[in-house]
Image (spheres, rainbow, N blue to C red):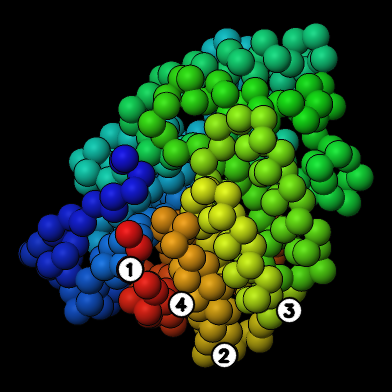
Amino acid sequence: MRHFSPPIRRRALLGGAGALAGLAVAPGLAQAAALPGLHVAAAAKGRFYGAALHPDTLAHDPQAMAHVPIECGMLGSQLAFKWAPLQPEPNRFDWKQADQLLAYARTQHMPVRGHTLVWYQANPDWLVKGLTKANAARILTQHIQTVVGHFRGQLVQWDVVNEALWPADGQPYGLRDSLWLRTLGPGYIDLAFHLCAAADPSALRCLNDYGFDAGREAPRKRDAMLTLLSSLLSRGVPVQAVGMQGHLDPGAGPIDQKALAAFCAAIAAMGLKIVITEMDVRDNSLPAAIIPRDAGVAAYGRAYLDVVLESQATLGVLTWGLSDRLTWLDWQIPRADHLPQRPLPLDTEMRRKPLWYAMREAFLAAKMHI
Ligand code: XIL
């Protein structure tokens, strides 16, 4: 199946050397010539590595984009497949951003994953204001059929439903009190997965969420996810994988390695796969000085990857961006001292950071995935 075989591209195997010919070499590119990219390390163990790009990087930052084919074996988009850009007005679909990513990915022979069909955020105003119990099933059906149908055969995975869980809301199964739950009840998840399966049977269907790795809420979140998955499977809902976002926060305390391993094992025992879909390590609880900050980010990322890559169910890892040049954390979860965060494998000069080396080592240390 498409999503199980990470492509190894020849140019990247050569350490990106082909991409460098004739360039006055920037520091990041010189490093990239010395060791092959992260996706090569991942592929050595049968996994993929890639990044979800911000559309601005793709459109306006050729220097950053030069590193994408070196490091990545899969791409996602931080915005392009969300509801607001895709269906800004009722029945008007706009494929521009998504098509730009797909056109680029085709030139690099890179598979692309879609994020996301159903979420409580990134919805256009018309949807938020106009959704009712009477029209919700029709609107959801039309969106998924149109969007998944449009991209049929072009995407290897879909985050069908994103962030459905928030146990503190007190709803059945720990579900989040969202516009979808209010209008359709828990069955909105069933509906979305069935529609996605019918519109593009070959894209791996993921239930994507966060908060399984550390912190006070994690035990409840893990329990809620396992309960939800078994109830979906018992009803024949065609969920195939758990997307674990992997937005990591050292401020939440150490990774619950034992509990996380048990969680992965429980998912695997249900016959489901795992994809790490949005990894980054926020550093707003770490010191300002760069050396200890980068070391803290790298160690935390490694503690996480060592656990999730131990599982045979884990197919691969995407980070939420590739370099610190552009990270959502700077506008959504800024540091108190307002220094830019350093959550990703490459720095703002596109040089490989301790997190990059930690990720490489985690991939190389992982068991072979078969
Ligand atoms: C974020 C984007 O990166 C931001 O640009 C946007 O303002 C908000 O959404 N979990 C998810 C992603 O599933 O879709 C979110 O992306 C980050 C958290």
Q: Secondary structure at mark 4?
A: helix
What's under tag 2, amino acid-wise? Answer: Pro
Q: How many marks?
A: 4
3D distance between C-alphas at marks 1 and 4: 22 Å
Dot 2 lies on which element? Answer: helix
The residue that label 3 is drawn on is: 253
Residue kind at label 4, given as amino acid type: Leu
Question: Between 244 and 179, which is closer to the camera in this rendering?
Answer: 244
Which quadrant of the rendered structure holds the C terminus? bottom left
Residue picked out by circle 1 = 368
Image mark for residue 292: 2
* Mark closest to the chain's N terminus, 3 or 4: 3
Mark nearer the viewer, 2 or 1 = 1
Ranked by sequence position, the earlier of labels 1 and 4 is 4
Q: Is residue 7 depicted above or below 106 in this figure?
A: below
Q: Disc 3 vs disc 4: Cβ atoms closer than 8 Å?
A: no
Q: Give the CA separation, mark 3 to mark 2.
A: 17 Å
At 36% from the left and 44% from the top, the residue drawn is 3
Dot 4 or dot 2: first in sequence order is 2
Q: Are marks 1 and 4 in contact (CB under 8 Å)?
A: no
Q: Position of residue 150 (x, y in %)?
A: 41, 20
Nearer the observer: mark 1 or 4; the answer is 1
Confirm if mark 3 falls within 8 A of ligand 1.
Answer: no
